[in-house]
């Protein structure tokens, strides 16, 4: 409480109002010691971001979050038995965070049988960018050897590809 009174009185002094109390030693406010007369030790400076906002400080932009549209995704149609990993690369000016954990229908193993596999991936945090996980990349289509799409589960596919 004594410190608060001293602070209030020092503010009054700054505005040219002289108020003196015998129980309050204002010298600690002017000699740089940073302690009050109660022997409590130095007054710690506030943590960054906890004090008043200085209008002269540059604005701090929040991190951006990556979206699937920020990436070029390739190798999304391949032939059964010869399937390689889908490639995912960031577009210019987008998150440089490492792409990892590419999954095909929830499985990290590249599928080799004909079918449709939803692809997801994660992106690591980078300067100015948040991390993201489970981003949808689209559907990997693994065609039958010799061409032709695999049958669609849950429907009858005609020769023209419609269900």
Image (cartoon, grey):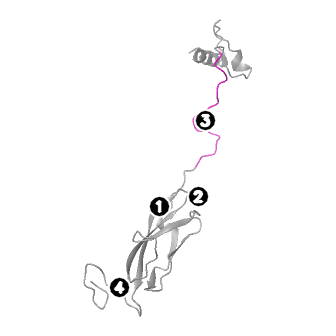
Q: Which mark lies nearer to you, 1 or 3?
A: 1
Where is residue 163 shown, x and y percent of the image?
27, 83
Disc 1 and disc 4 in contact, CB within 8 angstroms: no
Name the quadrant containing residue 26. top right
Going from N to C along the chain, the mark reached first, 1 or 3, is 3
Circle 2 is placed at which residue position?
A: 126
- The front one of 1 and 155 is 155
Q: Which residue is mark 3?
A: 47
Magenta stretch bounds? 39-60
Q: Residue at x 37, y 90 (%)?
A: 148
Q: Residue at x 42, y 70 (%)?
A: 107
Residue bearing the label numbered 1: 133
- Residue 153's image quarter? bottom left
Q: Which mark is residue 150?
A: 4
Q: CA distance from mark 4 to mark 3?
A: 60 Å
Q: Quadrant of residue 77?
A: bottom left
Q: Earlier in the sequence, mark 1 or mark 4?
A: 1
Secondary structure type for disc 4: loop
Q: SS of the residue at dot 3?
A: loop
In the picture, the quarter occupied by the N terminus is: top right
Asked if residue 89 is positioned above or below residue 132 in the image, the reply reads below
Callout 1–callout 2 Cβ contact below 8 Å: no
């Amino acid at each position: 409480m004594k410190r608060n009174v001293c602070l209030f009185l020092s503010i009054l002094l700054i505005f040219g109002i002289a108020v003196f109390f015998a129980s309050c030693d204002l010298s600690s406010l002017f000699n740089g010691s940073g302690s009050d007369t109660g022997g409590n030790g130095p007054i710690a400076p506030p943590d960054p971001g906890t004090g008043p906002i200085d209008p002269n400080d540059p604005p701090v932009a929040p991190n951006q979050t990556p979206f699937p549209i920020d990436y070029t995704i390739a190798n999304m149609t391949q032939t059964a038995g010869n399937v390689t990993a889908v490639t995912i690369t960031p577009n210019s000016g987008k998150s440089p965070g490492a792409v990892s954990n590419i999954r095909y229908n929830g499985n990290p193993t590249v599928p080799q049988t004909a079918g449709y596999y939803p692809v997801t991936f994660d992106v690591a945090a980078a300067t100015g960018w948040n991390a993201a996980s489970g981003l949808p990349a689209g559907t990997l289509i693994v065609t039958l050897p010799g061409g032709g799409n695999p049958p669609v589960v849950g429907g009858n596919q005609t020769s023209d590809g419609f269900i």
